[in-house]
Amino acid sequence: MRKSELHAGESVASLSNALIHLKDIWEKVGIPEEQRLIRTEVFTQHIKSMLDLMIEEEEGMKKRVENSLETCRKELDQLCVELGMPGVPEAAGLTMLQLEKDRRARLELMLRHKKERMDDLRALVESDGDLCDVLGAAPFSIDHNRVPSVEQLDGFRSHVGDLAAEKRRRQAEFVSLKEQIVASMEDLERLPETSFERDVVCEDEDAFCLSHDNIGRLKLLLTRLEDCKAENRRRCAAYRLKIQELWERLQTPQEEREASSPHMVHCKKENVEALRAELERLEALKMRSIRSFVEAIRAEVAVLWDKCFYNAGQRREFGVYYEEEDAFTEELLLRHEAEVSTLKRRYETHRPLFEGVARWRENWTLFLELDRKANDPARLNNRGGEPPQGAEAEGGPAEEPAQVGEEPEGPDRPLGAGVRRAVPGGRRPVRRLHQAAVGGLPRREGEGEDGEADEEDQAVRGGGEVRSGGEDAVKEAPGDGSHAEQGEEAQRRRHPQQHPELRLWEHYLPQRGVPAASRRQSLSVNGKASHSMERNKGYTTPLPDKNTPNVGAIKCQDNHDFTFSTSAGTYSDFARDLSKATKAETNPLNSTCSHH
C-alpha cells in the first residue's frame, strides 16, 4: 500500500475520532439534539469546503501540467522541423509530471542546439561579408533568420574557407604584382598617373579590393610596363649595336668608349637617353666622315658577298658598289647600309647552307691538292706523310653536298627564285661542278693533242659534228640561271686551265647523253704494264702514261684484264675500283717497275 493511502486512512480516522470526541463533549454539556445536528452539519461543511478547495487547487495544477505538456510538445515539434532532426518517441507509462520533465529537458537541449547554429550562422555571415567585400564576390545565399541545418552550415563554412584561401592567394598575387609594378615604375622612372595606380602603389595592401577586375587591371598595367621595359631594351640593344658599329667604323678611342660603358648594361630611362645622345653624336660625326664610312661598308659588303658565294652577275646587281663617286652623299651611304642589312639577313637565314658549302670547298681544295701531288713526278722523292690525309679527303667532296642539303633535290630539279639567290651562284654546288666537269674539262698532261685529234677523226669518220664538251654543257645546263652565269660557265669550260678546281673530275664523272655501256671501255696493252702504281699506306693513285689515253682497263704481263668503270660518280668510287684492281694484280706493280 502506498504511503499516501495510509495517510488518507489516518486522515479519515482522525476525522472520525474528532467527530466522536465532539459528540462526547456535546453529551456532557447537554446540548440538545437539534444543536448537535447543526454543529455536526457545520463540521461537515467546514471539512467539505476545505477538501473542495484542495481538490480545486489540485485540479488546477493538473490543468497546468497538461497545458505545459502540450506546449512542450508543440515546441519540440517545431524545433525538430527547424533543426532538421527527427522526433524522439516518448516512453510509455510515464505520469504527467515525468512526461513534462522529459519534454522540458529535450526542449532545453534543442534550444541550445538552435542557439549554437544561429551563432555559427551569424559568425559565418559576418566573415562572408568581409571576404566578399575584399574579393568583390557575391555573398553566400542563405536565410539569415532561419535556423540552418547541419549540411547548410557545413556548406557555408566550406564556402567561407574557400573565400579565405582565395583571399590569401590573391593577396600573394597582389603583393607580387605590386612589387613588380613598383620595380618597373622605378626602372622607367615613372610616377603613378591614375587613381588606380596610386591606390596600388601608395595605399595599404589590406585596403585594396582583390576582385577579379582589379587583378586583371593589375596584370594589364604590369604588361604595359613590361612592354615599355621591353621596348626600352630593344631600343637600347639597337642603340648599342649601332653605336658599336659606329665606334668600329669611326675608330673611336677606348677612352671615349669607356665614358659610355655604364649605359651599355642597364636599360633604364636615363640609359636610353644617354645612348640616344651618344648615337646622335656619332651619327653627326659619321655624316662628316661619309667617304671613309662608305669605303668601310664596301669592304664589309665584299666579305658578305664571299660568305654568301655571290657570283659576278649577282654582285653587279648592286651597281653603286662599282661607281666612282666624286662626292659621297648620304643617299649613297644609306644604300650601302641597306645592302649590308640585306646580306646579313640572308646569311643568317641560310647559315647552315653557306657553312656547309664552305666546308665542302675546303675538302675540294684539299682534294685537288692531293691529286696534283699524286700526279707530280717528284712524288717519288717523298714516300710518307700524305696517305692519311688523302684517305680522309676521298669521301669529303662527294659527301659534303649531302650535308649541305642539296643532293635530295636532284641535279635537274629547278630551284625557286628565292632559293636560287640563297645558293652559290644561284645554282646548287653539285650541279655547277657536274656541269663543269662533264662539259669541257681539260685532259691531264698525258692526254694531249693526240687524244683530241683522235676524237676529231672519229667524229669525221662517223659523219658527226665536232663539238666541245663546253658546248654540250652549255646546251644541257638548266635554264634557270642568268645569261651572265651561262657566259661565265662557258668561259670556264673554254679555258679550264684557269680553273684548276675542275680538272680532276673529268675522268670520274659520267658523260651526259652517253650510254653506260659505251662509257665502260677497256684497253688491253701488250707487254708490261703501261701504268705505274704508287702505294703509300693504303692510298693508291693512278699515274696515267703520257702516250696512252685515259682508259677504263689495264692489261698486265700475264694478260689479266682489270676494268675500271669510268662512270664512277665520285672520287671515292674511283679509288675503290682502283684498289680492287690493284689487289687482283698478280705481278708487283709499283713505282719501281720498269717501262718498255
Image (tube, rainbow, N blue to C red):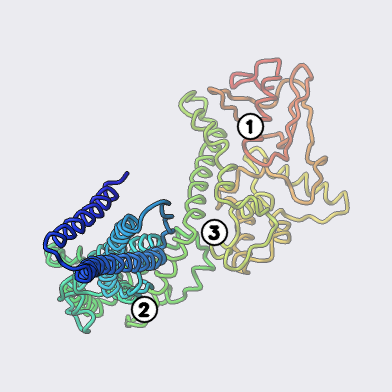
Q: Would residue 250 be visible to someone looking at this image?
A: no
Amino acid type at circle 1 is Ala
Let me know if residue 221 appears in the view: yes
Query: Which of the two residues, 402 or 163, is positioned nearer the viewer here?
Result: 163
Q: Is residue 165 left or right of residue 341?
A: left
Q: Secondary structure at mark 2?
A: helix
| Residue 334 disc label | 2
Bin the neighbour count of mark 3 within 10 Å (Cα to Cα): few under 14, some 14-19, many 20 and up.
many
Instruction: Write down the residue under mark 1.
Output: 575
Front position among marks 2 and 1: 2
The residue pinned by badge 3 equals 424
> Sequence order check: which comes first, mark 2 or mark 3?
2
SS category of the residue bearing label 3: helix
Tell me the distance, in whole angstroms, between the alpha carbons under discs 1 and 3. 28 Å
Badge 2 amino acid: Leu
Q: 201 and 229: which one is in front?
A: 201
Q: Amino acid at mark 3?
A: Pro
Residue 201 percent across, percent down from the top left: 18, 74
Q: Position of residue 532 (x, y in %)?
A: 63, 25
Measure how far apart labels 2 and 1 are at the Cα level.
Answer: 53 Å
Closer to the chain start, of discs 1 and 3, is 3
